[in-house]
């Protein structure tokens, strides 16, 4: 069956450290992958998009990798800040034409 | 520029009652989505419109859910009758790209509680 799996447990890290979130998928052939941030009571906000032929994408303190062999994307926040605390969602655009979301990983950055 | 606007933000109803949610997408965005989000889960697509045409409604429970996007601009999602299991957040999103979505812009959501 098709699955998108993100760390179900919350990730707790210290301010200044690098946060790494994982998105694994099975039985999909995504044309590209997106990452969104969601704060409590708010809608998701787009962060980054990476295509299947791209290995890595960066935007300020954010970095996303996409390994189609491992069927995995990693999302990194360097020099993390308490303001980075939120839930992060990965989403795959499948060849079938749908954007499908993972369940999200909650990140908590402690001062 | 205004973002995606949804209303109401919160709605509490008793089971078997009808409910409707409204969404106004970003001006010029041809593609509109309705997602359902349960607590602790990611958004799940209910229906996708390109202009006024519903191009993907395979996940919409058509026995009680209906949606329309007249004139290809704003959209309404209706549930009739509501069931306890319909309690969730209903998110509307829009995007500029047709067929192959780029960035989705989400509204703040409409939180439904069915008692």
Image (cartoon, grey):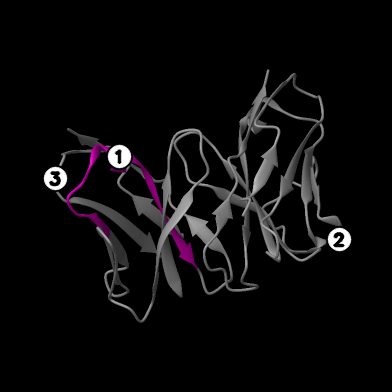
Going from N to C along the chain, the mark reached first, 3 or 1, is: 3
For residue A60, the mark is: none
* Near-viewer residue (B45 or A61): A61
CA separation, marks 2 and 1? Answer: 40 Å
Query: What residue is at 80 percent from the left and 24 percent from the top?
Result: B16
Most extreme residue toward the right, as rendered?
A: B70
Q: CA distance from mark 3 to mark 1?
A: 12 Å
Give above or below for A84 relative to B1.
above
Q: Residue at x 75, y 22 (%)?
A: B15
Instruction: Name the residue rendered at 39%, 46% in the picture.
Output: A104
Q: Chain of mark 3?
A: A
Q: Which residue is mark 3?
A: A16
Mark 1, residue position: A83
**Helix, strand or loop under label 2:** helix
Task: Using the image as rendered, state which of residue A97 and residue B106 is in the foreground.
Answer: B106
Q: Quadrant of residue B28?
A: bottom right
Is residue A9 visible in the rendered structure shown here?
no
Residue B26's quadrant in the figure?
bottom right
Q: Chain of mark 1?
A: A
Give me the disc on residue B71: 2
Q: Residue at x 61, y 55 (%)?
A: B1
Q: Position of residue B99 (x, y in %)?
A: 64, 73
Q: Is residue B62 above or below residue A50?
A: above
Which residue, as the protein is rendered here, is positioned at the far bottom?
Answer: A53
Disc 2 with disc 3 on a shared chain: no
Say which quadrant the C terminus of chain B sits in: top right
Q: Give the magenta-colored segment's residue range.
A: A75-93
| Mark 3 surroundings: few (<14), some (14-19) or many (≥20) residues within 10 A | some
């Amino acid at each position: 069956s098709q699955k998108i799996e993100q760390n179900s447990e919350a990730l707790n890290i210290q301010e200044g450290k690098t946060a790494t979130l994982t998105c694994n998928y099975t039985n999909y052939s995504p044309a590209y992958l997106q990452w969104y941030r969601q704060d409590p009571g708010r809608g998701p906000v787009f962060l980054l998009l990476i295509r299947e032929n791209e290995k890595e994408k960066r935007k300020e303190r954010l970095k996303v990798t996409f390994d189609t062999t491992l069927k995995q994307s990693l999302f990194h926040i360097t020099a993390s800040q308490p303001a980075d605390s939120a839930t992060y969602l990965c989403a795959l655009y499948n060849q079938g034409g749908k954007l499908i979301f993972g369940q999200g990983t909650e990140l908590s950055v402690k001062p | 520029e205004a973002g995606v606007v949804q209303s109401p933000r919160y709605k509490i109803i008793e089971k078997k009652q009808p409910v409707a949610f409204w969404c106004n997408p970003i001006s010029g965005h041809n593609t509109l989505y309705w997602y359902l989000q349960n607590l602790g889960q990611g958004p799940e697509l209910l229906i996708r419109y390109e202009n006024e045409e519903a191009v993907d409604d395979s996940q919409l429970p058509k026995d009680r859910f209906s949606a329309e996007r007249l004139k290809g601009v704003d959209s309404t999602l209706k549930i009739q009758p509501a069931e306890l299991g319909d309690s969730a957040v209903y998110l509307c999103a829009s995007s500029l790209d047709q067929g192959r979505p780029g960035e989705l812009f989400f509204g703040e959501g409409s939180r439904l509680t069915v008692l």
